Amino acid sequence: MQVNHRYFPHTKKDIEEMLTIIGKNKVEELFESIPKSKLLNEELDLPSSLNELDLYKKLEDIGNLNKRLVSFLGAGAYDNYTPSAVKAIASRQEFLTSYTPYQAEISQGTLQYIFEFQSLVCELTQMDASNASMYDGATATVEAIFMAVAHTKREKVLIANTINPNTLEVIKTYLKYKNIEIVLVESTNFLVSLDDLKQKLDSDIAAFVLQTPNFYGYLEDIDVKDLLEANKSLYIVNAPLCDLAVLKSPGEMKADIACGEAQSMGLSLSFGGPYLGYLACKNFLLRKLPGRIVGLTNDIEGRRAFVLTLQAREQHIKREKASSNICSNQSLMALQVLLYAMLMGKNGLVNYSYDSFNKAHYFYNELLKLDNFKKVTDNEFFKEFVVMYTGDIEKLNNELLNNNILGGLNLEKISNELKNQMLLCINYTKTKEEIDNFINIVRGIK
């Protein structure tokens, strides 16, 4: 028998009692502050009641109206596969302890997987320390900047303009109210300009933020550590956690802080969230890390024990000295990412990465054999790339959608200078047949 109750129905008496307490006569009065033009003015075609079996069938019929699309769109959110074992293990009792892991004696399961997640992040990034996780890659980048500003006592930051535009918008929102100035470093041929970086680097710069692979999918591999160190500025590298199984790590790039998104490690697209950010750093910045850090120790009987070691939060220290006001983490998402990594293993993560690389390059080369696709650069890429399409990109994407395919991103929406250019993505979930189907559909478009 399946027992999976996810809601508590209210009786008519329950509703009347709640309305009486808050001083309302009917439920509709709760929505009086919303303009009538924004409210639905027609009756929904809903039956008064259904038994559970009929309800499931009704919902399945509605769900079948959706299109199941094969996605060739990336741009920061990636289609991937979550093994069924991930959610099964995440539901085990030892992980379903209290939400806040402050009471170590009853939260050992939660504290252990946070510790293991921190270890995973440190191994992939080759940094010294990691916190318990962040809300997403964008806010993790913001917190990295706050760390740099707190350490250097400077209020100006350089950011490569090849960073994900959505991440940049989040950074602008946060930094506006911290009075931290943003200076964008220009790019040439989809890669950050070292000459422009040198020109804009001055004694007021707290840090330089670089994303690799960048928003356009290209590998940013510039040696700027000595330049930044001479200026007493920090180096922040934003990189997708999963890609670090094969790509040069932030540690190898001599970064001071590493941050980014971990969604591509087994977290579904889910209409944009919840996702998972990570944040790691070198030892000299350890006490500037926001949120929580779990440590490993022994109890009085010599048994292994996990405890909250550091919490750089304004609730625990003087507000003016706090590096952040983040009050939580994404522990459930962190657990799923950890389980994904453990189930895949080192070889699995590496093999999936190479599979993504090989399929993306096969797709790229097949596109360039068509008359209506042109090369725009010879830059090295991993699983995303830019191509020029000589026709109408919106019409192309509509035609692909008619064939249950989600096409690439029209980059003219990002910049008018990128007219007729589109960003496409391939990873290990795509089959050769799906790639060839895309090619054949495009080949048939006049």
Image (cartoon, rainbow, N blue to C red):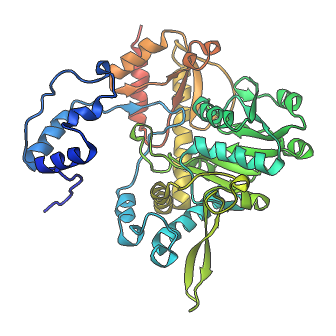
**Which image quarter: residue 287?**
bottom right
Q: Residue at x 42, y 67 (%)?
A: 98
Which residue is more in the foreground, 63 or 140?
Answer: 140
Residue 349, compared with residue 422, is above or below; it is: below
Image location of residue 302, percent across then percent down = 58, 90
Expressed as whole percent of the image width and height from the top left, the position of residue 258 reads: 69, 50
Q: Quadrant of residue 297?
A: bottom right
Of the pair 229 and 189, the residue shown nearer to us? 229
| Residue 223 falls in image quadrant | top right
From the viewer's side, name the closer residue of 403 and 440: 403
Tell me if 349 is positioned left or right of 11 in this view. Answer: right
Q: Is residue 136 above or below residue 127?
A: above
The reply, left or right, for residue 372 in relation to residue 253 is: left
Point 70% across, 59% down: residue: 318
Q: Position of residue 140 (x, y in %)?
A: 62, 46
Q: Can residue 255 be seen?
A: no
Image quarter in which the C terminus is found? top left
Split into 4 quadrants, where in the image is the N terminus?
bottom left
Residue lying at the far right in this picture: please name it: 230
Q: Nearer the viewer, residue 157 or 116?
A: 157
Residue 229 at least partly seen: yes
Please give the count of numbered marks on the rendered protein.
Answer: 0
Instruction: Determine whether 444 is above or below 361 in the image.
Output: above
Q: Is residue 28 above or below residue 256?
A: above
Q: Residue at x 68, y 30 (%)?
A: 162
Q: Position of residue 280 (x, y in %)?
A: 67, 55
Q: Residue at x 41, y 47 (%)?
A: 81
